[in-house]
């Protein structure tokens, strides 16, 4: 079968690899139908994702159809349309015992540490497969996984209705966060970005205020919008140089700052901005068994993922897709690689 492999940073190749066979453990064979391109995939391609190992078949936003099940499969059946959980955990380390397998000490993420979804078939445990809504096209169903990331971040933030929320970054991640944050009916939701078009879209999708951080002072405006206090929850979905410091500077006293970035590049931060306000700085990584929760929200029409994908490419044209991402075309919201 064909697969897309990052051999080393900036070296993407279409390779042939053996079609997997089901086993007692990996007892479901899934024919991949679509797999999304995430910022972390781009980071692996460019060599800026510190978690990745090479060579690697990337892709962790993975949807497809079950085409074969093992004799010990009990919950999944042939013909079901599913999304595959990207997290594999040991089940016995401290993090796993604390019900946080998403940061397992022995964590292996499909598409990062082990081969992922940019290939024609995958064999996985049936417990890692979740049935997707019938009305959702495969290209849009890849957005379930980014939405689980947003649900995880909101869980880490312990969102409440009295919160004033600031989301820094209105790209694909920020847009997913906005979909979930608004379900908590917080006091306000402010989106900050350097792209006016993205901010216009954020206002249409439920933001109560926006900050163009290219032309406005982000910290000053965030405080003005919140009556001088500062946001009570600040989520850094931009994950660029300086964004974490801005998040901490904007945040009000005794509030929560959520960081989601994976860069290992040195950045500026200081103890005073954290200690003086007694901020809770919390990382949010991947998702902690959130697929069922998100699929329920989609089925109940509380979250609309239709139309979230802006572009599709045949998976064998992955190089063209990644080149398009690198072009930073402002029309890009989300790209799905299609396998049929």
Image (spheres, rainbow, N blue to C red):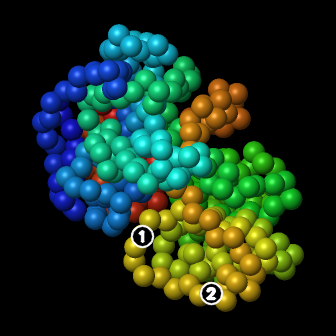
Residue 311 visible somewhere in the drawing: no
Residue 331 visible somewhere in the drawing: yes
Residue situated in front as seen by the camera: 195 or 89: 89
Q: At 71% across and 35% down in the image, what residue appears?
A: 302
User: Reading the chain from its start, which is encountered first: label 1 or label 2?
Assistant: 1
* Quarter occupied by residue 198: bottom right
Residue situated in front as seen by the camera: 335 or 111: 111
Q: Position of residue 42 (x, y in %)?
A: 34, 57
Q: Is residue 48 above or below residue 271?
A: above
CA gap between label 1 and label 2 equals 20 Å
209 with respect to 1 (left or right) = right
Q: Position of residue 210 (x, y in %)?
A: 70, 66
* Quarter occupied by residue 161: bottom right
Q: Nearer the viewer, mark 1 or mark 2?
A: 2
Q: At 64% across and 35% down in the image, what residue appears?
A: 293
Q: Position of residue 29 (x, y in %)?
A: 32, 22
Residue situated in front as seen by the camera: 157 or 330: 157
Q: Position of residue 103 (x, y in %)?
A: 49, 53
- Label 2 belongs to which residue? 271
Q: Residues within 10 Å of mark 1 (few under 14, many from 20)?
A: some
Query: Image quadrant for the N terminus?
Result: top left
Q: Which mark is drawn over residue 263?
A: 1
Q: Is residue 169 above or below residue 205?
A: below
Q: Is residue 66 above or below residue 184?
A: above
Q: At 69% across and 58% down in the image, what residue appears?
A: 157
301 with respect to 141 (left or right) = right
261 with respect to 300 (left or right) = left
Q: Disc count in the image?
A: 2
Q: Secondary structure at mark 1?
A: loop
């Amino acid at each position: 079968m064909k697969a897309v492999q990052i051999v080393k940073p900036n070296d993407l190749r279409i390779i042939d690899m053996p079609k997997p066979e089901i086993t007692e453990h990996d007892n479901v064979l899934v024919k991949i139908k679509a797999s999304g391109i995430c910022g972390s995939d781009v980071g692996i391609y460019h060599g800026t994702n510190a978690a990745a190992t090479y060579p690697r078949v990337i892709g962790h936003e993975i949807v497809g159809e079950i085409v074969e099940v093992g004799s010990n499969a009990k919950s999944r059946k042939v013909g079901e349309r599913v999304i595959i959980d990207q997290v594999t955990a040991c089940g016995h380390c401290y993090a796993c015992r604390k019900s946080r397998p998403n940061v397992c000490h022995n964590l292996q993420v499909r598409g990062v540490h082990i081969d992922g979804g940019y290939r024609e078939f995958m064999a996985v445990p049936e417990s890692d497969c979740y049935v997707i809504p019938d009305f959702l096209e495969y290209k849009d169903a890849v957005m379930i996984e980014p939405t689980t990331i947003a649900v995880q971040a909101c869980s880490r933030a312990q969102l409440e209705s009295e919160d004033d929320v600031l989301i820094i970054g209105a790209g694909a991640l920020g847009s997913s966060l906005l979909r979930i944050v608004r379900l908590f009916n917080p006091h306000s939701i402010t989106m900050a970005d350097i792209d006016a078009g993205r901010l216009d879209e954020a206002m249409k999708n439920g933001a109560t205020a926006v900050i163009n951080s290219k032309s406005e002072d982000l910290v000053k405006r965030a405080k003005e919008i919140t009556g001088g206090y500062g946001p009570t929850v600040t989520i850094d979905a931009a994950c660029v140089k300086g964004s974490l410091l801005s998040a901490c500077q904007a945040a009000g006293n005794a509030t929560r700052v959520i960081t989601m970035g994976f860069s290992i590049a040195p950045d500026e931060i200081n103890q005073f901005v954290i200690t003086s306000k007694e901020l809770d700085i919390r990382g949010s990584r991947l998702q902690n068994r959130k697929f069922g929760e998100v699929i329920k929200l989609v089925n109940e029409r509380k979250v609309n993922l239709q139309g979230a994908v802006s572009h599709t490419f045949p998976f064998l044209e992955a190089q063209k897709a990644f080149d398009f991402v690198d072009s930073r075309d402002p029309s890009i919201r989300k790209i799905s690689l299609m396998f049929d």
